[in-house]
Amino acid sequence: MRTVYLYHLLYLLLLVVHPSSVSSWKRDEFRNCNQTPFCKRARSRKPGSCALIATDVTIADGDLTAKLISKNPSQEDQEPIKPLILTLSAYQDGILRLKIDEDPTLDPPKKRFEVPDVIVPEFLNKKLWLQRVSKETIYDDSEYSSVMYLSDGYEAVLRHDPFEVFVREKGGKRVLSLNSHGLFDFEQLRVKNEEEDWEERFKGHTDTRPYGPQSISFDVSFYGADFVYGIPEHATSLALNPTRGPEVEDSEPYRLFNLDVFEYIHDSPFGIYGSIPFMISHGKARGTSGFFWLNAAEMQIDVLGSGWNGESSILLPSDQNRIDTLWMSEAGVVDAFFFVGPWPKDIVRQYTSVTGTLALPQLFATAYHQCRWNYRDEEDVENVDSKFDEHDIPYDVLWLDIEHTDGKKYFTWDRVLFPNPEEMQKKLDAKGRHMVTIVDPHLKRDESYYLHKEATEKGYYVKDATGKDFDGWCWPGSSSYPDMLNPEIRSWWAEKFSYKNYVGSTPSLYIWNDMNEPSVFNGPEVTMPRDALHYGGVEHRELHNAYGYYFHMATADGLVRRGDGKDRPFVLSRAFFPGSQRYGAVWTGDNSADWDHLRVSVPMILTLGLTGISFSGADVGGFFGNPEPELLVRWYQLGAYYPFFRGHAHHDTKRREPWLFGERNTELMREAIHIRYMLLPYFYTLFREANMSGIPVVRPLWMEFPADEATFSNDEAFMVGNSLLVQGVYTEGAKHASVYLPGGQSWYDLRTGTVCKGGATHKVEVSESVPSFQRAGTIIPRKDRFRRSSTQMANDPYTLVIALNTSQAAEGELYVDDGKSFEFEKGAYIHRRFVFSDGKLTSSSMSQSFHGKSQFSSDCIVERIILLGLSPGAKSALIEPANREVEIGLGPLHLRGGRSPPVLTIRKPNVRITDDWTIKTL
Ligand code: NOJ
């Protein structure tokens, strides 16, 4: 044991002192499926091995309930298999919820963990109270199946023998099913036999597993599916590749286990920082469907390639495009949701109706963030800040990493390096800028550290298997971790963010939660032992994937409380779980400065958006290593379209602020950042859309073009909202890129206004930017004047860019509020719809009526309207009701940049964004 400890100390030292000198990804540090007994057991089961049948079907409390019992009587020498309790519930919008657990009346040794605090209360109110269940014989079954209403178009079927659950179109085709291949298995908790050894060992760590095997596994099939997507977080393609099957090389399943993986590689099914067990299928035949398993234990998911079940005799209704998957979890219960779609946007709406939609961020948080491990001291901060101004580059937030603290004790300052933190923040604030400091969950075990003292005295730390405060290694050395499952501890934690408690903090300071998987340098797989204990006797194995979620939740709550509930929080988290979207942003962790990581950032961010987490980004420039200037420029050009846009770098890398690579590169990076600032009104409108409906800010092309097969596996390009298509440039020295523009309408180059045909692949010149196009038929609101920060742009006028389609029509939206408070929830916002048709642009209000509870007013005007694709002829425009005529003439597409091409422009219409008006071309 001692040698192991020394080894880890050595590893830690290497990590801390020379992180980049340690060669890349240590595969052996992490368990593979074969080294994970529950995964190995589940993978070795044969189709049809489930012997459960459903009996005693009744309706109770508006749900269908049944018992699952074994068809085969147990052998004399075996313990009898106890019945499981199954519940099926229907919710509005065709959502089916399936729960399977042990029967509490049969005295199981322990209550299995059900994850609280994820499902939003409003969802529970959407339950449909079942009145009746009908019986039906399906196939040649000797037993009836029970059929229940789900929505007008869909019904759920519980097949009794063999046990199977599926959702189908009313009386018709299947959409999703569970246990169609008989792989369902539920290891019930039981008393240990004397000769059994339940301990599991890995790399010198022993997991005592006091409750023994308790895993659950089952197969889920998606019908009419060409591809499956989702289940982040993995650095891999958007459309998930099969992990098993005759054509598949030996592959690991997709692992969901929150881990701090040092130098993760760019194409792998291994688990990294966050976990969302939500999979989406999409196909031309049927559209979109989704399956979500609310479970916080380690999960492994196989996508089964066709022919995987070659030797099985199970026959399913013929379906050319069925995708089978195998879900395996170490612990917990079955609490699963089936979503019927049928379209991509329906799926994210349905999923976020269960787990919540994105919290609307403050406007500043949607702008550019400048980070580095570390900005050394106050002078460094001041220099970096003033260089942005000198180089005419806007930015909104300056970040301080762990070195700003006194000995990695969070909520403290290194007073030599940062003697006047308040003043430093105030100086930034004067320019409308903000600061973010890092606060991690590991608390230094230092008697003189007030937080440690308090947490110890109050018994607030996670316990080890023996009941002592768990002690692990992280940045400060010996550390303990507050037990965030306990609401009282979360509340205690939240209070630490008050201005009084967090000495040196000011209202313009926000927070970064890192290492919250949690990362434990000397723990098994660099995390907390599974037999550590939480509130209520919950084992860490049951909760693991949600630890970071709770930490994020408590921190965000702290910021809300700090501002008396008036200031929207901003908290960036590395670990995440379903529902994290309600607490802030996430980023993709420690990527590397290479082209492959630039490329994989797109499918990673798109996948996060599909699974509710709309506010995400990757470290621009790559965290590890030194990007060549060309790569850095390409990263800024792409990163400008990430929902969360932040440059960040490891402390061993060379400085890489945007002005350090020669005038030409500075110019290109400046332009990339300017594009983001110019599009902030559009982004903010999209954030509000995500906040209201769950539909992500950046979207796979197939979300907007669900019938276009050419888009299904395209993860080099993406949509920002429904109006912009962007594609990264992922190779060195590229002069051109091939860009597929979907749909029947044209597209307009964002920089040049050049029109390109839809439904075709174009060769696009990329020497100055990455390809970006506005879709014909859309209107994008912009702000074209540049200031130091987004905050300073608040009163600036708008430009509307109208890209007309073949019917000379277009529409778009603009959402505006104070960018800061929660007043928008009471109606204090402006939400306009712009429609151009019959030569007329109309602005009308989309706001819901809140009966004047709270109002937001703005004197902002529209100063330019750009008309792309307008048929020739119009010379002027009439503004109504003002009855004023203004000129239409040629004007620059962009106010900045000498090379901006001339485009048809309605000059100075000067209409207010709050008002209803019409502008008629004459
Ligand atoms: C790991 C994080 O992923 C990285 O972004 C950060 O700079 C370091 N921890 C130091 O805090």
Image (cartoon, helix red, strand yellow):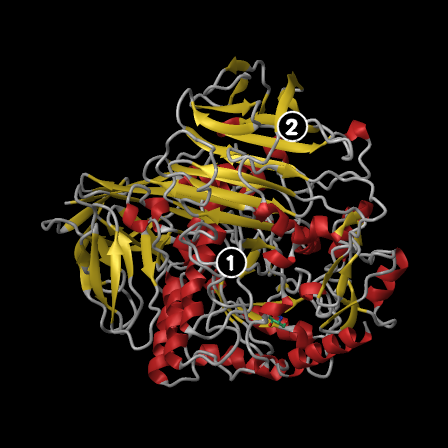
Residue 677 position within the rendered picture, expressed as x and y whole percent measured from the top left? 41, 63
The residue to which callout 2 is attached is 86
Residue 185 location, x and y as percent?
63, 38
**Residue depicted at 40% across the width and 63% down the height:** 676
Q: In which quarter of the image is ligand 1?
A: bottom right
808 and 196: which one is in front? 196
Q: Residue placed farthest to the front in the image? A: 76
Circle number at residue 269: 1
Q: Nearer the viewer, residue 71 or 558?
A: 71
Q: What residue type is labelled 1?
A: Pro
Badge 1 marks a residue whose secondary structure is: loop
Amino acid on which the number 2 mark rests in the picture: Leu
For the residue pair 370 and 860, the one nearer the viewer reads as: 370
- Tag 2: Cα neighbours inside 10 Å, few (<14), some, or many (≥20)? many
- Work out whether mark 2 precedes mark 1 in sequence or the reverse, and give the earlier one: 2
Q: Position of residue 544 (x, y in %)?
A: 69, 53
x and y, in percent, of residue 604 in the image: 47, 58
Looking at the rendered structure, the number of numbered marks drawn on it comes to: 2
Q: Residue at x 47, y 34 (%)?
A: 313
Q: In this view, does 798 lie above or below 829?
A: below
Q: Residue 421 carries which label?
A: none
